[in-house]
Amino acid sequence: MQEAQIKNREKEKKTAVLHRFYSAFSNYDKNGAFKGIDFIIDRLEILNILKEEVFFRHDINKETGLSVYVLIKKNIVKEVSITYIRDSWFKYLESLPIYEYPSSRTNDEGNYLTIKITPEMLINKFLGSIGNYLSEQIIDRLTPNEDLVFVKDKKNCKYFYYKNGFLTVTANNIGA
């Protein structure tokens, strides 16, 4: 029994981490009747989650401000659009498990109530305000903690990249 409780708590903690980008609260009218659930979205946490998904802005030329958005998976860099990043965010929302968000309200026995948060509720919130939470100005903040360093050709060495690997070419050798 205790092992099941521990596993359940671990699952709840993991779910809470996935849902960390918002606060939820129930709205009640002055008579105490339930009006609905609202969210406060933390834009910084959205950026942190997108960075965990390895999305970044790569500055090609800092002087002119020329930059692109990239996705890095398995050391492969892929240029992506803002639309791709937004679509990925919505896929993230769709993949979220239902969360029993802790409420500050208690029932008659004094136990804290929870608010059931579904992916559909969060998607609906974001659909109403995509430009507010996933604007170009916000996505531009996907700056890496360290500069992205790419292997560059050298005077006597050239690199050719393919989907499944790369070749190194020198005057004396062609190899992986």
Image (tube, helix red, strand yellow):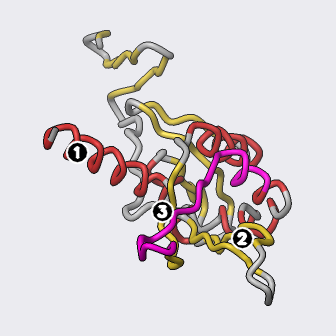
Q: Is residue 143 visible?
A: no
Q: Is residue 42 among the parts visible in the rendering?
A: yes
Q: Residue tagged by mark 2?
A: 38
Left or right: 30 with respect to 153?
right
Which residue is rendered at x = 45% and y = 31% of the image? 76
Which region of the structure is painted magenta? 107-124
- C-alpha separation, residue under disc 1 versus residue under disc 3: 22 Å
Cα–Cα gap, marks 2 and 3: 15 Å
The quadrant of the rendering that contains the N terminus is top left
Q: Could you tell me which residue is drawn at 57 percent across and 37 percent down?
A: 95
Q: Give the amino acid type for the residue marked by disc 3 in the picture.
A: Arg
* Mark 3, secondary structure of its residue: loop
SS for tag 2?
A: strand
Quadrant location, the C terminus = top left
Three-letter code, disc 2: Asp
Quarter-of-image position of residue 40: bottom right
Secondary-structure class at tag 1: helix
Which of discs 1 and 3 lies nearer the camera? The answer is: 1
Q: Earlier in the sequence, mark 2 or mark 1?
A: 1
In the picture, measured across the screen, residue 84 lies left or right of residue 157, that is right
**In the image, is residue 64 above or below residue 13?**
below
Discs 2, 3 touching: Cβ within 8 Å:
no
The residue singled out by tag 3 in the image is 20
Q: Residues within 10 Å of mark 1 (few under 14, many from 20)?
A: few
